[in-house]
Every structure is written in structure tokens, then in C-alpha cells.
């Protein structure tokens, strides 16, 4: 299992604060030579020293863990592997140094690459049948949520204030929200047939219509969404203005995402949900039952428990359809998702489709040695009418194996022997003996031999950077 390499992060934070090694070492109570070894990842760090470093540099442990740097590394490697750049092979050591030592420069490289892709796609004919060019803002919105750690204190505060005013019994929360909508806003709520929509709000008539096809937990969630739309506008507008989305479409997506976040905070209040998650050891079915929410809603809420002083386990969250299209993605656990293209077919996210409704568990080990306890389950929605395929998604979560003892799904697993090697995606994976490989890695040349049939669909020569 890989040892966290945080020395470069410590060095960068020290330099940003204009501190010498001698000054920082003195405040930490260690020698300057020991600190020098730490900054070069040649010495480990005890838990007590790690806490002192975090306190002295005034950062949280998540910042020191290198999570952000690992995500940057994965995105940089994916960028440099693009064959259309026709670039020299960039050694892993240089990628690591850029991500850890100059994160602002690394983000600038990624921004330039994204802009280049957009320009290339636009000039290459990404257009509607009418000829109008399009640019989807989804990646910009995902970046917004990931950069905020999928945690928004202002919305948590707004939700807690609303819940205090309503003082509702948890079992009657949906009724309390509906009553507040009726009494304070003069709104009627109607559940019935709703053609082409699940929810529709008519501000002129002060009427909220919910589809009869919605399960009970979704009706409660949309009631909370509506309350946030009416009573948390100032908080949401402030965050949108601060983030400055690049287009009206991105702004609308951010608004919807923030209102969904607020709705989750109303239905699953931070404190009680955090306590229950610890008590139930993150058993999602029990958590969903306790709060009257769906499996997906409980999973997504778990990924947002990052309040300073009351943090939950840092989970990543993913929702993907059978075609591999990702519709939701939060990487709180530091899992380095591939930004472009598909993911590894050996990952439990994809094998979960073979056992509908059953939670599948996997210890996934990345090429750099980092290991994650992952669990996934498929969820099936209701089709609009008979004969239409029902919507199907896989909901997946995961955390670094260091948190395995806190998660019920790790019970009975031999965490080392059960590890399954996966890659970020086939085009970035160097594993030579993978039977599930969809195509060869971009950085290596094919080694074609008609005299031999290998276990992998593609044989290739490993191209080493010098």
C-alpha cells in the first residue's frame, strides 16, 4: 500500500507563508535537518507531528493528505497522454513535482488543455443539426463542486435555521415542510399525473405539482427543494455570484445543484446524519430507512460530510449509466477519476450491473499502490409508460482503505488479499496482462506477433521516459 507523500505539500505551504525551514522546525519542536528529510519524503510523519504541522500552517488534515495533488497528477497524466498533443513523454516524477510543488501552474495547464479541447471540438464540427455550435457546461459545474469539497457551510447553516423554526419531528418532516409552504407562501401541493415532468412549479398560481410516479422519498426531497428555492435565494445567489459561471447554462446548473444540496441538508440534517452514519458504520440501507430517503440520496449526502471539527469519512460518489456516462461525480476521497473517456471495466462500478439491487464490494488498487474500499449498487427507476426501458444507474462510493474499519462493507474482507488492480482508464493503464482491456495505452507501442495469442487483447511495449 502506498505511503502518503506529503513532503512537497509541506514545503509548498511553508514557502507560501515565507517561512524558513529553521523557523518552521523551531515551531514544530524538531530539527531543521529532520524537516528537510520530511519535505523530501525521506522520513515518515507521526500522527502527533502531522497535527502540529496542520495547526502551525493553519490548514486542515485534508490539505496535508495530498488528496488535491493526487487529483491534479491524474488529470495531468491524462492530459499529457493525449496523442493529439504530439508531446514528449513526461516522466511521472515531473508530473508529481508539478502537481505538488506548483499546483497553480498545474491547474493553468489543465485549463489551457480544456480550452484547447473545446476549441478543437468546436472547429471540428461539434454542432446541432441546425448548425449551431454547442458547449456543454457540465465539467465547469463539476469543478465548482469539487473545488468546494462538495460542502457548503452557508447552506448547512440555512437548512439548520429552517429546521429550528419548523421544530418538526423527524418522522413528520415532509408534512412540516408542506405546511410551511402552505402557511408562509400560500402554496398548494398537488400529486397527480404530470406529463413530461416530475415536478412543476407555477409561481403565479403559487402551485407545486408533483408527479404521481415519484416514490415517497422523492416527493419529500422536492418539497425541500421548493422550500429552498423560496427561502434560501440570497445564500444561493451569493455563491453563484462568487463563482462567476462562464455561461447562463452553467449558472443554472450551479443553482440547481446548490438547491439540491440544501434539500438534502433539510431532509438529512448534518448533525443527526453524521451521528447515525458513525453509529450504523455507513450501512446505506439502514441510513436511508432511518431518514426516509432513497439509497442514492443517502449516498450523496455522505459525500458532503466535511464540516471542520465534525468531518465524516471522506467518500467519493459516482452515478453512471450502463453506457458509462457519468451524470454525477464527487471525489471527496481523492479518487483520481479520469476526466475524459471511460473508466476501468474491472472496477466494481461496472460489475454491479450484473447483480441488480445487490451491493457489490471491492478493494480497488490503483497503479500507484493507493487502495480504496469501493461499494456499488444498481438502482432502477420507473419508466414513463409500458414498453419503455426503465432508467438504470449504478450508484458507487468509496473511501481510502485506512477508513475500512469504520465501514460495514469491509467486514470479513482481507483487505490486502482481496485487492483488485484497476486503472483509471484503458488508455492510461500500463497493466500488460489485463483480459478486460478495451484498447492499448496511448503511451506505448503495440507489439504485434501473429505467432502468439496473449491473455490480453492487446500486447504492447512499455515505453519508458528517460
Image (cartoon, rainbow, N blue to C red):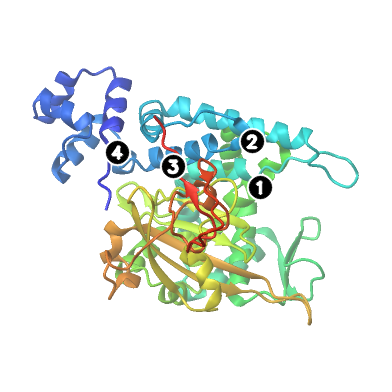
State the residue position of label 4. Answer: 64
Q: Nearer the viewer, mark 2 or mark 3?
A: 3
- 121 vs 294, left or right, is right
**From where the camera sits, is residue 280 visible?**
no
Q: How many angstroms separate mark 2 from mark 4 (CA)?
A: 29 Å
Real-space Cα separation, disc 2 to disc 3, in angstroms:
22 Å
- Relative image position of residue 156 (x, y in whole percent): 46, 51
Q: Which residue is mark 3?
A: 71
Q: Can you tell which of label 3 and label 1 is closer to the viewer?
A: 3
Task: Name which of mark 3 and mark 4 comes first in the sequence.
Answer: 4
In front here: 199 or 230?
Answer: 199
- The crowding category of the residue bearing disc 2, from other C-alpha atoms within 10 Å (few below 14, some 14 to 19, many at least 20), is some
State the image coordinates of residue 146 (x, y, percent, origin top left): 49, 44
- The earlier-in-sequence mark between 2 and 3 is 3
How far apart marks 1 and 4 lie (CA) works out to 31 Å
Task: Please say if the residues under marks 2 and 1 sit with CB atoms less than 8 Å apart.
Answer: yes
Q: Nearer the viewer, residue 332 or 37?
A: 37
| Sequence order check, earlier mark of 2 and 4 | 4
Foreground residue, 230 or 255? 255
Amino acid at each position: 500500500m502506498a505511503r502518503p507523500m506529503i513532503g512537497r505539500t509541506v514545503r509548498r505551504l511553508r514557502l507560501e507563508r515565507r517561512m524558513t525551514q529553521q523557523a518552521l522546525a523551531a515551531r514544530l519542536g524538531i530539527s531543521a535537518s529532520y524537516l528537510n528529510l520530511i519535505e523530501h519524503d525521506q522520513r515518515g510523519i507521526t500522527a502527533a507531528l502531522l497535527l502540529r504541522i496542520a495547526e502551525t500552517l493553519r490548514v486542515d488534515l485534508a490539505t496535508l493528505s495530498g488528496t488535491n495533488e493526487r487529483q491534479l497528477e491524474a488529470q495531468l497524466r491524462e492530459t499529457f497522454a493525449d496523442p493529439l498533443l504530439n508531446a514528449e513523454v513526461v516522466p511521472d516524477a515531473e508530473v508529481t513535482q508539478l502537481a505538488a510543488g506548483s499546483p497553480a501552474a498545474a491547474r493553468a495547464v489543465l485549463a489551457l488543455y480544456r480550452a484547447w479541447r473545446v476549441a478543437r471540438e468546436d472547429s471540428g464540427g461539434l454542432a446541432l443539426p441546425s448548425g449551431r455550435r454547442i458547449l456543454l457546461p457540465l465539467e465547469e459545474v463539476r469543478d465548482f463542486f469539487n473545488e468546494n469539497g462538495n460542502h457548503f457551510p452557508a447552506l448547512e447553516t440555512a437548512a439548520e435555521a429552517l429546521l429550528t423554526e419548523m421544530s418538526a419531528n423527524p418522522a413528520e418532516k415532509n408534512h412540516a415542510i408542506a405546511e410551511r409552504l402552505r402557511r408562509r407562501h400560500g402554496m398548494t401541493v398537488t400529486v397527480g399525473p404530470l406529463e413530461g415532468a416530475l415536478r412543476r412549479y407555477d409561481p403565479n398560481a403559487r402551485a407545486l405539482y408533483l408527479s404521481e410516479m415519484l416514490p415517497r422519498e422523492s416527493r419529500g426531497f422536492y418539497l425541500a427543494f421548493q422550500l429552498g428555492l423560496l427561502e434560501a435565494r440570497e445564500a444561493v445567489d451569493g455563491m453563484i455570484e462568487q463563482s462567476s459561471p462562464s455561461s447562463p447554462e452553467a449558472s443554472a446548473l450551479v443553482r440547481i445543484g446548490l438547491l439540491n444540496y440544501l434539500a438534502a441538508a433539510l431532509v438529512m440534517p448534518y448533525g443527526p446524519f453524521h451521528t447515525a452514519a458513525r453509529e450504523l458504520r455507513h450501512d446505506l440501507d439502514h441510513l436511508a430507512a432511518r431518514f426516509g430517503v432513497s439509497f442514492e440520496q443517502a449516498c450523496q449526502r455522505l459525500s458532503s460530510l466535511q464540516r471542520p471539527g465534525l468531518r465524516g469519512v471522506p467518500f467519493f460518489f459516482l452515478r453512471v449509466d450502463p453506457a458509462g456516462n457519468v451524470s454525477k461525480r464527487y471525489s471527496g476521497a481523492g479518487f483520481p477519476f479520469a476526466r475524459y473517456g471511460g473508466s476501468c471495466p474491472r472496477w466494481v462500478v461496472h460489475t454491479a450491473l450484473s447483480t441488480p439491487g445487490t451491493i457489490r464490494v471491492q478493494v480497488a488498487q490503483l497503479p500507484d499502490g493507493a487502495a480504496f474500499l469501493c461499494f456499488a449498487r444498481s438502482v432502477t427507476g420507473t419508466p414513463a409508460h409500458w414498453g419503455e426501458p426503465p432508467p438504470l444507474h449504478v450508484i458507487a462510493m468509496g473511501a481510502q482503505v485506512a477508513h475500512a474499519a469504520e465501514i460495514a462493507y469491509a467486514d470479513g474482507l482481507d483487505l490486502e488479499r482481496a485487492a483488485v488492480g484497476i486503472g483509471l482508464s484503458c488508455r492510461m493503464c500500463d497493466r500488460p496482462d489485463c483480459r478486460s482491456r478495451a484498447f492499448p495505452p496511448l503511451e506505448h507501442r503495440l507489439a504485434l506477433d501473429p505467432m502468439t495469442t496473449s491473455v490480453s487483447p492487446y500486447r504492447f511495449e512499455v515505453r519508458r521516459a528517460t
